[in-house]
Amino acid sequence: MKHVLILGGGYAGMMAALRLTAKLRAHKDDIHITLINASDTFTERIRLHQAAVGKPLPQYSIPKMLKKRNIQFIQGWVTAIEPNQHQVRVQIEKELQTFHYDILIYALGSHTDLDSIPGIRDYAYTLDEKSAQKLKQHLPRIAAKSGTLVICGGGLTGIETATELAEHFPTLHTRLVTQGQLGGGLSPKGRKYIHKVFSKLNIQRDEQVSVRAINHNAILLDNGHTISYDILIWAGSFNAPELAKQAGITVNNKNQILIDQYLRSISHPDIFVVGDAGQFVSSPEATIRMACATAMPMGARGGENVAALIQSKPLTAFHFNYLLQCISLGRRVGLIQFVHGDDTPKERILTGKIGAWVKELICRFTIWSLKIERYFPGAYKWAGAKRGNQIIHYEHEKSYRNV
């Protein structure tokens, strides 16, 4: 019997599990699939800025989402991977257990980089699940005294967080600091609309400045100026967990496992990587954005390729096209930025209530896709799945059967 171990129950891990088990229905007595995740609840990370203002988010039980799919679920914290021994160490309550595998699907996602600037880890909140719950408790108190909220990061996470909190807590003095342009990856029309919404919500912007250090009540900028705060949210870049690096698996400087076109680790081909934790080595200039938009397609293709490997069938290269960048700007308005397949912006945008409606529809589509995949295997599709004008390009594309 072959053992497939899936680490991570986020967007990529869940899609990989569902697609894999569907492809192996005829072999269910010969395959044992286990999914390990720290929580037994699926977290909609794309909605955590809503949780920070106290909006209750839907709770989705992972065991229920995997029900009748021939997948064993284990709630535990992965502490180590031992690829040469084909085993993983997992902390389950007070006991450290070992799980063996023939094939590993690594879907442990990413987290905010807390070590790039001195003081982040000690003084800043981030937009993870734990921080969102703490923010929900502290923000009303800061808003009641008209305190200052500073958000560091001018990407999509920073923009969504700033607008969500400024709209919900209008008495806060909200200020966003970014080392680049606000919404630098957007078209001129898109950036203009972001600035318009920021002005309407009285959000102060500090662009083209870098944070050098953080202390208990202020951030120090590289130009020597300081900005005081009552509460600080760090919305900077993401890193993958260090587990793979510690295990001797080949990674990049963000701890992402370097993978080939079939989503396999270039150093350990019995490890497939899906979602934020992987980066293609064949096309480093075409960086895959760490996002739900890429995690779910990678999960689907990863599940298919593991199933193909087990059945001694050719593997299929991963191809993908971007279509949109969807940005919520509070609960009332949003921005939909149309993009080329390589994620560069087109001039076309949707704004206002229509933008907010499309953004909400996309958010709902992600959870619907997982539910539909459970009942209708293979239903989930993505742009660029077939060869064409895809973002990832490979010089030599081949199929092979053996690990």
Image (cartoon, rainbow, N blue to C red):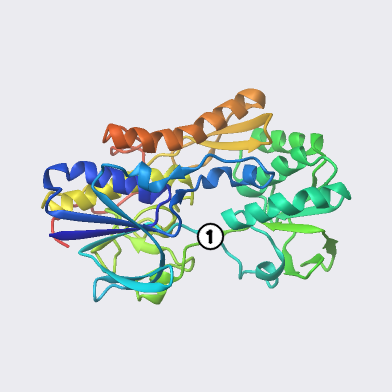
Question: What is the residue that sits farthest to the front in this orientation?
Answer: 94
Q: Nearer the viewer, residue 320 or 285?
A: 320
- Residue ID at (67%, 56%): 134
Q: Left or right of 205: which side holds 75?
A: left
Q: Is residue 200 above or below residue 5?
A: above
Q: Quadrant of residue 178?
A: bottom right
Q: Is residue 281 above or below residue 350?
A: below
Q: Tell me the kind of residue under disc 1.
A: His
| Towards the viewer: 389 or 158 | 158
Q: Residue at x 85, y 61 (%)?
A: 228
Q: Quadrant of the C terminus?
A: bottom left
**Residue 272, position in %: x, y?**
29, 58
Residue 107: percent from the left, percent from the top?
A: 38, 56
Residue shown at 27%/71% (left/top)? 87
Say left or right for 333 vs 281: right
Of residues 130 and 205, the one drawn nearer to the viewer in this rendering: 130
Which residue carries the number 1 mark?
Answer: 111
